[in-house]
Amino acid sequence: MRRAVVLFDLDETLIHDRASTAASFAAVAAAHGLDGAALQATMRAAAFPLWRDGPAAAYCEAIGISWWEGLAGPFGPSPVAELAALHAWIPRFRAAAWSAALAALHTAASPVDLEAAFTADRLRRNVPYADAAATLERLRAAGHRLGVVTNGAPDYQRLKLDGSGLRPWFDAVVVSGEVGVGKPDPRILRVALDRLGCAPDQAAMVGDNPARDVAGARAAGILAVLVDRGEPGGGADAVVRQLSEIPGLVA
Ligand SMILES: [Mg+2]
């Protein structure tokens, strides 16, 4: 099933998200005599309700911005009203979340210090999956054109991709926060296809999330390839365990 264009999701498809977030919690916890897993769990309990009730919660759900991304990412000024609201609110969100989490842990550690340490650490961890670069290289060598279609905030998704070192392989990068719709809405995939001059039946979409990547690809008429990172759900046209299986699949 030759496909001229291969589109990729970013988080948990090309780069680690869960493991990097856990590693950042572990690193800042260790520096302050705390347990990383306990800090992360306590932070989730503190931050998620704030995030869920925040000023752009519905937008973040639709566009795909998570509470842990809210703790770390850059959310710069934006003409988009919801992103502007996030930009204004994020400092208060982080301060409240770190204060609540550290109070719950009965530690005297400074919320200001941990917030700064966590943000700096997490922004540095944009670690690709071990077979990502070699897979992209093989696809390019075989003549495929490549795109990233990622849900999230524009500044942060582009920082992650640049930080991962994977950006040079891609002909197009489409971020939900830049186009106003997120996967599984097929319109974001059509934006990518338009930029690459490709028909749906000549493209494949590779992602880890059945509800967003697989459902979106199928709605757009694109071959849906699930890279199995443990997310429940089905419906994919093909399932792989490793990115290195992709070149053979679309050859
Ligand atoms: Mg993903």
Image: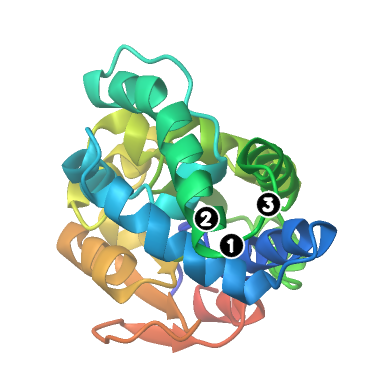
**Residue 92 picture location, percent across and down:** 42, 30
What secondary structure is marked by label 2?
helix
Distance from Cα at disc 3 to Cα at disc 2: 8 Å
The amino acid sitting under disc 2 is: Ala
**Residue 66 picture location, percent across and down:** 39, 52
| Residue 63 appears anywhere in the view | yes
The amino acid sitting under disc 3 is: Ala
Residue 141, above or below 236: above
Instruction: Name the disc covering residue 108, or none.
Output: 3
**In this picture, residue 183 sits left or right of residue 209:** left
Label 2 sits on residue: 103
Instruction: Name the disc covering residue 155, or none.
Output: none
**Residue 77 picture location, percent across and down:** 43, 14
Q: Earlier in the sequence, mark 3 or mark 2?
A: 2
Distance from Cα at disc 1 to Cα at disc 2: 5 Å
Which is more toward the observer, 185 or 154? 154
Residue 63, picture quadrant? top left
**In this picture, residue 166 sits left or right of residue 43:** right
Q: Quadrant holding ligand 1?
A: bottom left
What secondary structure is marked by label 3?
loop
| Residue 148 appears anywhere in the view | no
Q: Is mark 1 within 8 Å of ligand 1?
A: no
**Residue 112 picture location, percent across and down:** 64, 35
Q: How is the image coloured?
A: rainbow
Which is more toward the observer, 105 or 154? 105
Pointer 1 and pointer 2: residues touching (CB < 8 Å)?
yes
Label 1 sits on residue: 106
